[in-house]
Image (spheres, rainbow, N blue to C red):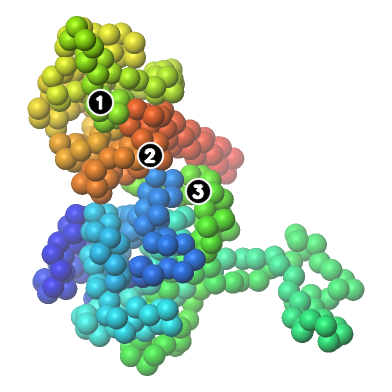
Amino acid sequence: MAAASKNGMRGLNDDCSDAKRRKVNSDDSRYIAALILARGGSKGIPLKNIKMLAGVPLMGWVIRAALDSGVFDSVWVSTDHDEIASVARAWGAEVHRRSPEVSKDSSSSLETIQEFSRLNPDVGVICNIQATSPCLHPHHLKEAVEFITKEGFDSVFSVVRRHHFRWQEVEKGDGQCTKALNLNPVCRPRRQDWAGELCENGSFYFTTKELLEKGLLQSGKMKYFEMKPEYSVDIDVDIDWPVAEQRVLRFGYFGKDKPEVVRLLLCNVSGCLTDGQIYISANGEEMVSINTRDQAGIDMLKKEEVKVILIEKDPITNALADKLSQRMGCPLLQKVDDKLKKVQELMEKKRMEWKEVAYLGNDEADIKCLELAGLSGVPMDAPTVARNHAKYICRNAAGHGAVREFAEHILLLKKKAKSQMEQDRICRNTF
């Protein structure tokens, strides 16, 4: 069926015995697939599923969580749109090209999941993950799937606890009185005295093939999985975007490698630090333009003991290279034809691992480094071939603040990780 994805998972026509061995802590022999629905015709926000959220395509957050959970034999994106399909593959998912019959505005999620199930009869359990839930973590999926594989439940879905008082809706202008649905107005409970109510948050739905064949997503032995409110983000309208971005920066899942270990930033000169243009004076002198914001970003990293090295593939004059190096306060490596080889030499010399390296690139020559680096980014105006392999896509263009933005992203993740480590330390010492 589908070719192997970047994380090594294979299509359903491959030997299922390998698939069984890949499952984490499971004696269940059923093939378990994750399915992310991402139709191209979103009415609220056009192409919402691949719109950048905190430097990552929206659905990239849940693809990464699903792949890193280790509980799925394959991870799929169901779409009818070429660009969404391209982004899905770039992030390691396989693609189910849904039919026109289930791509209409009136089509339900259940119909699309049923089509996938019919076309993939070997799949015994499907987890429908909502692309608009960017704070989903691998541990949510690991814990939830065990209700299926170890405790024999037929459907498991995510919920969040809400403390909302609900009232009956009435028609406007008819004078009808409303009434409370879940409280006694005479004796309103305090928040701390009321457990609240469990509401679906839409993050994910596990269900069996047998239920889908009956036209059901939730039935049989049902179990809910409660997620904390901070992880229950659902983006419906454009106004939610800034709020969701702040939430995901604080509570989102950024991958297996901890960002606090980053010790080195490698940054391209042309197409990252500069806009790629070289100016030539009347007497033949070469000049480039740099942004003071980018210089400030490099200074910020150095203050936090992150070493910065500039890389340039195209030849520039020694005088210009020396001036750039002096101005930015960091070494500049010239005429680097094989960037991967050069970076590996630097890592070996400094005894570093890839997870300790951040890389800001902008073109095809940077792809391998972008894939391997613990943190990687590209400017807003980088070619698609580079954008598809970066973990972070800047909102700023090359030469216009992209370096500063990426530096702030690195430092934000380091701060987030250090805060979590301190919280873990407090918890260990307290309990």
Question: Which badge, 2 or 3, is on the more N-terminal residue?
Answer: 3
Q: Amino acid at mark 2?
A: Cys
| 43 horizontally vs 119: left or right | right
- Please say whether residue 369 is visible from this viewpoint: yes
- Disc assigned to residue 245: 3
- Which structural element holds mark 1? loop
- Whole-angstrom CA distance, mark 2 to mark 3, is 14 Å
> Between 26 and 198, which is closer to the camera in this rendering?
198
Rounded to the nearest angstrom, the CA distance separating label 3 from label 1 is 33 Å
Question: N-terminal of the two: label 1 or label 2?
Answer: 1
Q: In which quadrant of the rendered image does the C terminus lie?
A: top right
Q: Which residue is mark 2?
A: 394
Q: Residue at x 56, y 50 (%)?
A: 243
229 relative to 347 in the view: left or right: right
Task: Tell me the residue that label 1 is attached to.
Answer: 277
Position of 145 relative to 373 (above/below): below
Judge left or right: residue 171 versus residue 305. Answer: right
The residue positioned farthest toward the bottom in the image shown: 214
- Residue 357 visible from this viewpoint: no
